[in-house]
Image (spheres, rainbow, N blue to C red):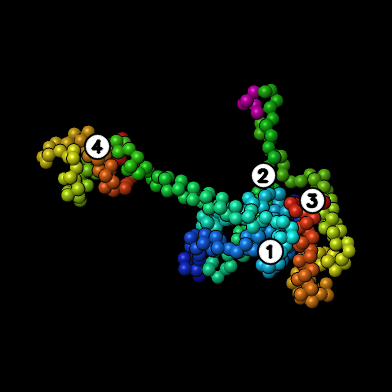
Amino acid sequence: MTRKKNRRQRVPLDRLTDALVDDILATPDADLLKEAQADADNGAAVARRAFERASRMTALRRLAASKRPPRGGRPVGANIRALDPKTARGWLDEFMASHPETASKLDDAPAAGDQLSDEDVYGMLEALQKRGVLKQRTIDQGRR
Amino acid sequence: MQARDSGALLLTELEVRRAISALPPADWLRLHKVARALCRNAYFDAEDLLQEAFQRALGGSRQCSRTVDIVHFLVGVMRSIASDWRKARKRRPEMSLVTHKGTLPEVVVQVRDQSPTADEWLAGIQEATCLKKAILDLFADDGVAQRMLEGIMDGIAGEELRSLTGLSQTQFASKRRLIRRRIDRAFPQEWKP
């Protein structure tokens, strides 16, 4: 009750503020510029400065958001060795099956028929990762 | 169908950025004047309000319809932010740490009751009354302006307000401008009696 009354005391001022804002919106450009000149008002520069700062902040936020990992886990680029060996082998097999020509170009690819050690599998996945050909995926399920 | 449902009805973030960047000097001035008017009643800085409004527009959390003038859109955003900030300021409780024996586990966070005390309530009424008087006193030489101001503060608007003053449309606009200019000079920052 008292809070309501307290708020009501400000209502006349709120109404006055609204009327002042309406007048600012209705004032022709030329008159506003004349007023600024008469009052040495640098409001336009202040508003531009606020816009530039807001632009920088928005750009920084976008950048931060783009660097943030997607929901559900880190991207594969984070650390390939966080995968458990079975998942890593599955990924490599999957990649070999779908990109035989790229896989064959890897410098450190073992000869066909070789039994790959876990280390080989991680090494190859890292090599693929380095070349940017490994599909973006998350490593949550396969974490060791 | 709501505007939000159709991308074609809304400006993209890039379009908003371009529209704001291309504003003429008078509109930058207009935005600043509006921010200052809104801040006078709310205890925060005009530049902060402007920056927050731009950020919300550029970040897409507030979207502008293609049919709305960008300045009117930004003014709407500022009005909404100012209202939120005022409410948040009122809600923010005063807190203090209280310890009786000086040991950490016994520290109590004391949150003050937010409802105004009788003294605060009276002080609020007095301040508002003083302020209203101070504003009206600015126009002691102009009975029409005083009538107009009283009408505005009583919630009268538009044609009803104009007929109360007995002014023509042009005279009414001039008087309203005179009121704004005088208030701007007398209260450059915030309402203080």
> Residue at point 81% right, 64% down?
B149
> Residue at point 78% right, 59% down?
B183
Q: Residues within 10 Å of mark 4 (few under 14, many from 20)?
A: many
The spot of residue B165 in percent (x, y) is 83, 72
Query: On the image, numbered disc 4 is attached to which residue?
Result: A122
Task: For marks 4 and 2, give the CA distance.
Answer: 54 Å
Marking on residue B92: 2
In which quadrant is the C terminus of chain A drawn? top left
Residue B104 magenta: yes
> Residue at point 76% right, 76% down?
B169
Element assignment for label 2 = loop
Marking on residue B192: 3
Q: Are marks 1 and 3 in contact (CB under 8 Å)?
A: no
Q: Nearer the viewer, mark 2 or mark 3?
A: 3
Instruction: Residue type at mark 4: give it.
Output: Tyr
Instruction: Residue type at mark 3: give it.
Output: Lys
Magenta-drawn stretch, dominant element (helix, strand or loop): helix
Element assignment for label 3 = loop
Task: For marks 2 and 1, give the CA distance.
Answer: 39 Å
Q: Nearer the viewer, residue A55 or B143?
A: A55
Location of residue B112 by image quarter: top right
Query: On the image, numbered disc 1 is attached to which residue?
Result: A33
